[in-house]
Image (cartoon, helix red, strand yellow):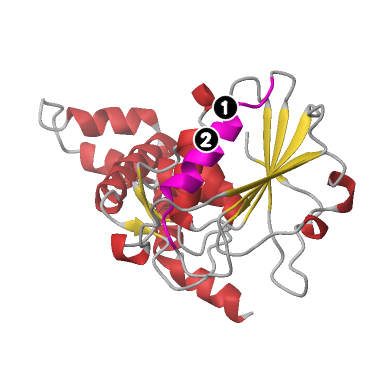
Amino acid sequence: MKHFREKVKESAHSILEICVLVCILFIPRLMNATKLIEICFQNAELNFDNIKYYFLLQSGNWVIGGIATVTLLLKFRKLNKDKMFNTMNVYHDYSYAWYWFCAKILGYKKCNLKLVPIFMQFKLALNDTFNVYYVGEEDDYPVKEEEIININKLSCNPITNEINLVFADTYPIIKEQIPRNQRDLSTIFISRNQGDFNRYFSPQFIGTINNEVRQLPRNVKRVNIYATTNPKHTLKIASSAFKLADRGNIDKLVVFQQGKDGARRFERKGRTIS
């Protein structure tokens, strides 16, 4: 319940804007705005200054409400374009529909990816839902130069047409955390974690992932991702390795979310990103 209240509090501004827009749409109908305009025209002569009100009178209450709603929406979009979406220190596990609505309709251009589920980070980045993504300050991610990246390939001779890619970053990942029904697939473990759980930015980690993705054989049609990547790594991986132009023959990209408790196994059902 506390988490729900925090989410509502964070979204209060957007919810309020939606409520105002809905009210504006219905108010002309409830107040019979055309009747009010008609009364005003009873003793007025039609001229260039008031002809717009005449057209509104002829259009009806719903059109008046629609015009007022669009006008106000444009003002909201102008106010929201410089605001950051996801500003509170809560877990931002909103639906993609909510992110899309706030970005494309309410006009938010910037989104904070910190504390956003990894599968949603991928989806937002790959779909260019927002124009700008914030992952923290540069000081939050010390650069790890010339880092040794471990690659471990299982059941890859030959590689199946559905493959698991495991990106172990802030936390290690073992095979037993992958859903049982996915374990027999060809699996490539790419790991930079050597017991240090701090956030880093590793060019070698990103480069290794890019190389492995681009070297996947043409028969690979579906990729399952299991990742413990920090937001900066996730954003870079999504944009450099899995943008549509760089995905080769991959038809389906599925990201599995890791559980928070116990052995932290990944959910049995992944989230289709594209």
**Depth check: 71 or 116 in front?**
116
Residue, disc 2: 210
Callout 2 amino acid: Asn
**Depth check: 198 or 120 in front?**
198
Horizontal and vertical percent position of residue 142:
35, 62
Query: Can you say which quadrant of the picture contains the N terminus?
Result: bottom right
Residue 61 figure quarter: top left
Question: With 121 as the anchor, is 104 left or right in this view?
Answer: left
Callout 1 amino acid: Arg
Residue, disc 1: 214
On the question of residue 101 being in view, the answer is: no
Question: With 224 as the anchor, is 170 left or right in this view?
Answer: left
On the question of residue 90 being in view, the answer is: yes
Q: Residue at x 55, y 63 (%)?
A: 170
Q: Residue furthest bottom?
A: 2
**In the rendered image, the vertical position of residue 73 relative to residue 197, given as above or below:** above
Residue 163 figure quarter: top right
